[in-house]
Image (cartoon, rainbow, N blue to C red):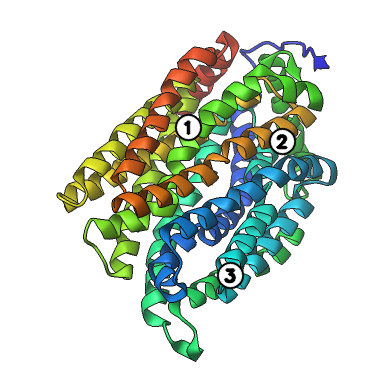
Amino acid sequence: MTIQAQADPIDNSFGPPATLDNAYRRITLRLLPFLMVLWILSWIDRVNIGFAKLQMLSDLKFSETVYGIGAGIFFLGYFICEVPSNLLLEYIGARKTIARITFLWGICCVAMMFVTTPAFFYVLRFFLGVFEAGFYPGVILFLTYWYPTERRAKVFGLFMSASALAGVIGGPLAGAILNGMNGVNGWAGWQWVFLLEGIPSILAGVVTLFYLTDRPAKASWLTPAEKALVEADLARDAAALGPREHGILASLKDARVWQCIAIFFCIITANSALTFFGPSVVREAGYTDPLTVGWIMSAAYLCGGAGMILNGRHSDRTGEARLHCGIPASIGALAIAAVGVLIPSSPVLAMLALTVAIVGTMSAIPVFWQIPGRFLAGSAAAAGIALINSVANLAGFGAPSAMGYLREHTGSASTGLYLVAAFEAATLLLILRFIPPATPALKHRAEARAAHEQA
């Protein structure tokens, strides 16, 4: 069913500006740093396989194809469990759900140090996806409980930039562990990577249970006046959005959900290929030391994080999401193709192109998540956002598997990069075909808020 909200006057939609802004500032300072730390841990534990690969494959005699399947099978577990996990979050709350997710993925990451066969490798990567399923869309849904539409792209950008920070931290950290811990206690460097990067997630899961607050009404760290202002602002936002789908089954049948899946599938194809094969591409360009590879990837992700924040902020200020998603994706597609042309003949230019590819692809992601929230709410948002993320993330299985197969049979990453670039390039075309511009009410609210910030 749908719920028709009554529109409130737009001119007074911000209430007492300083007080409301202060309330959102307190929410941001309370929630965002902690959620970003969790996302950093999640991202490191998900993608550290790309750095462990630099030693792991030769130690265990795994082929590139085995690695590609193992890296990608994570997303099959992700796909199966993501919608149930997000519906559980809607039912029992974010605090318990996110705590469970964080604790279990940490245990699975540590268990990766004991891998000896391809089958064991596949099983653990699959269960890592099962355990982590629901975290990313769960946080997206969780943040919609706290922020109105015109503030979300910036908040999403801040949260998702943590994946870039994870790249900044994780690359040099993994390289240092591979070099410095190899042979300690009789364990290989790649085993130490999984152990030392999994333990913090286990501890963070316990902390989450005591730290997070499910909704503004339960926030003891907000004053009663601040709670009332935020709740009223969220109600006004719901009115400006107009009727949205609230029914779970209806949302799963909504063509707009499946259009969003197609768009995000193209983005994730590029994102997962760059994530799991970025270190290998750097090595193919001629940079073979693990620590050097880590620092190069760190610099690229630092730029990607800046792109996410700046693009999300500009999207919020203009009220425009379509082109803020499609244009960066198109730039990323061109850069990915350029990497395929430039390696290994022009290593420096290839690394510059790789950086642009990461910036373009990552900058498109937070703005994309503005789109589903404009037609889904409540349980429909819980199911719809999870469905979009889970089905689209099947690209995370297909892209690494295809990259591994093509690399093994052609001896180069270039062919796989061209394929990935083609998917990424389709993002803008799908957006222009299926996604309508923002409503005048949303644009008016964005412009009003931008004017208020400049005053």
Q: Is residue 286 above or below residue 76?
A: below
Tell me how far mark 3 sits from mark 1, CA to CA: 29 Å
Whole-percent x and y of residue 155? 55, 38
Which residue does the numbered mark 1 point to in the structure image? 266
Tell me how far mark 2 sits from mark 3, CA to CA: 35 Å
Report the amino acid beneath label 1. Answer: Cys
Q: Callout 3: helix, strand or loop?
A: helix
Q: Earlier in the sequence, mark 3 or mark 1?
A: 3
- Residue drawn where x is 69% and y is 53% of the image: 130
Q: Left or right of 437: which side holds 361?
A: left
**Which corner quadrant holds the N terminus?**
top right
Q: Is residue 39 above or below residue 110?
A: above
Q: Earlier in the sequence, mark 1 or mark 2?
A: 2
Q: Left or right of 176: which side holds 71?
A: right
- Whether residue 14 can be seen here: no
Q: Left or right of 434: which side holds 238?
A: right
Whole-percent x and y of residue 301? 38, 51
Report the amino acid beneath label 2. Answer: Tyr
Q: State yes or no: discs 3 and 1 in contact (Cβ < 8 Å).
A: no
Local crowd size for mark 1, using a 10 Å CA cut-off: few (<14), some (14–19), many (≥20): many
Q: State yes or no: discs 1 and 2 in contact (Cβ < 8 Å).
A: no
Label of residue 375 in the image: none
Whole-percent x and y of residue 384? 70, 30
Q: Callout 1: helix, strand or loop?
A: helix
Of residues 119 and 46, the one nearer the viewer is: 119
Which residue does the numbered mark 3 point to in the structure image? 112
Of residues 237 and 117, the one nearer the viewer is: 117
Which residue does the numbered mark 2 point to in the structure image? 145
Q: Nearer the viewer, mark 2 or mark 3?
A: 3
- Whether residue 50 can be seen here: yes
